[in-house]
Image (spheres, helix red, strand yellow):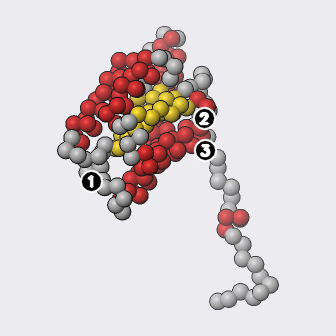
Amino acid sequence: MSLPMTETVTDPAETAPPTAERSYPRFAKPQRVAFVQSSWHRDVVAGCWESFVREIVERGIVASQVDLFEVPGSFEIPLHVQMLAKTRRYTAIVAAGLVVDDGLTGFVAQTVIQALMDVQLKTEVPVFSAVATPHSFERGSPNTEHFRQHFATKGADVAHACADTLLSLERLRGQVAAGIV
């Protein structure tokens, strides 16, 4: 069926009710986050940083309070995370990297994750991992775009986990200080 020339078609987006803005609880104190990213396969991992910053700002942390640090590879991430945690300058630290299967994948990935867990438990600075270990990865293969998308999604996910954890810890520390817990 064709419409007469005098009728107009209304774009559904123009008539739809406006979407509700997402509302998140605000922090009582300023937060500062370090983002430690491996530069190995930067073209794949970079989307994680970009989506992380976009989401963490939406969650109430000012972009100027998020610092990016690059390291050569994922194996180097834990030492940098530990040094940053010890400064007490950061309320949270995020690690992002791609561990590629070269016969050591299980060792490297397990070592990195365990070291990140050790850092957060020793320093009480929450550490979040966006370190991925695909079963197979070849640069330039059709699945490279899949991994780019994965890291972009992971960045948003880790931003939400980071903000939620910081809010939870802020409340818990307040309760501990007040003698409630």
Disc with the residue nearer the chain's start (1 vs 2): 2
> Observer-nearest residue: 47 or 139?
139
Alpha carbon separation for disc pair 1 and 2: 34 Å
Q: Give the mark nearer the N terminus: 3 vs 1.
A: 3
Q: Which mark is residue 63?
A: 2
Type of amino acid at the residue the image marks with label 1: Ser
Find the distance from the CA under tag 3 to the CA under tag 1. 37 Å
Q: Residue 116: name its quadrant.
A: top left
> Residue 44: horizontal and vertical position, in percent?
42, 49
Q: Are marks 1 and 2 in contact (CB under 8 Å)?
A: no
Mark seen at residue 22: 3
Spatial CA distance of label 2 from label 3 is 18 Å
Q: Which kind of residue does numbered mark 3 sit on? A: Arg
Looking at the picture, how far across and down is residue 152, in whole percent? 46, 49
Q: Is residue 125 visible?
A: yes
- Out of 19 and 93, give the one closest to the viewer: 93
Give the quarter of the figure containing the C terminus: top left
Determine whether label 2 and label 3 are within 8 Å by CB.
no
Q: Residue furthest right?
A: 6
Kindly identify the residue that appears in the image at 26 percent across and 51 percent down: 135
Residue located 59% across and 38% down the image: 57
Marking on residue 128? none
Residue at 61% of width from left, 31% of height from top? Answer: 64
**Secondary structure type for disc 2:** helix
Image coordinates for residue 148, horizontal then vertical, percent: 43, 52
Outermost residue toward the front in this view: 72
Q: Position of residue 131 (x, y in %)?
A: 36, 40
Circle 3 or circle 1, nearest the eye? 1
Which is closer to the viewer, label 2 or label 3?
Answer: 2
Q: Residues within 10 Å of mark 3 (few under 14, many from 20)?
A: few
Rendered position, 165 above or below 157 = above
Q: Which residue carries the number 1 mark?
A: 136
